[in-house]
Amino acid sequence: MLDFINPVYAKADAEILREIGKRLKQRRIGNDWTQLELAKATGISKDQISKIERTGRTSLATLVAVSRKFGLLQQLLAVYETPELTPMQKYEIEQKTAKIKKKKRVKRGKR
């Protein structure tokens, strides 16, 4: 369940993106890299690095490339880690899938 009391949920998407860009910039500076050095190391243009730092807007592929350079791939993947399904959840998914398949067979048979 999401914690909607957390103040981050009150922020607009653009504000969150800018915060991500700001943190990326802080990490780059903390590693004593220029934008050009990070660009060369990731295969991303210097202008794109600058845009990301200002706006936070980027593609997922670019985020992966930058995360790889910063050694953050594991953390990036952990953000969307899914818990193991319980046996009951697996059973319910199987039942729903079976119902959908049955409906498709019935529709095809009526033609």
Image: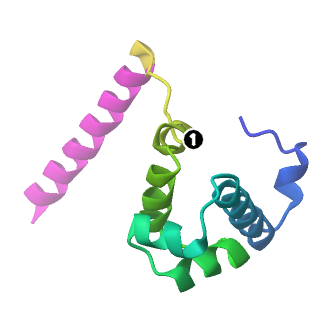
Quarter of the image that includes the N terminus: top right
Q: Position of residue 65 (x, y in %)?
A: 43, 60
Of all residues, the one furthest to the bottom in this rendering is: 47
> How would you rate the neighbour count of disc 1 (Cα within 10 Å): few for under 14, some for 14-19, many for 20 or more?
few
Work out which quarter of the rendered image holds the C terminus and state it.
Answer: bottom left
Q: Is residue 57 something one can see in this rendering?
A: no
In this rendering, the answer to whether 97 lies above or below 12 is: above
Q: Amino acid at mark 1?
A: Val
Q: Identify the main secondary structure in magenta.
A: helix
Is 103 on the left or on the right of 18, as rendered?
left
> For mark 1, what is the residue?
79
Looking at the image, which residue is at 46% across and 81% down? Answer: 45
Residue located 42% across and 65% down the image: 42
Q: Nearer the viewer, residue 88 or 33?
A: 33
Asked whether the viewer can see residue 53, the reply is yes
Residue at point 68%, 72% (across, down): 53
Give the left or right position of residue 26, taking residue 42 as reference. Answer: right
Asked whether 101 falls inside the magenta stretch, the response is: yes
Report the residue that reaches farthest toward the top.
Answer: 87
The foreground one among 111 and 94 is 94
> What range of the chain is rendered magenta?
89-111
Q: Is residue 38 above or below residue 90?
A: below
Percent position (x, y) of residue 24? Answer: 66, 60
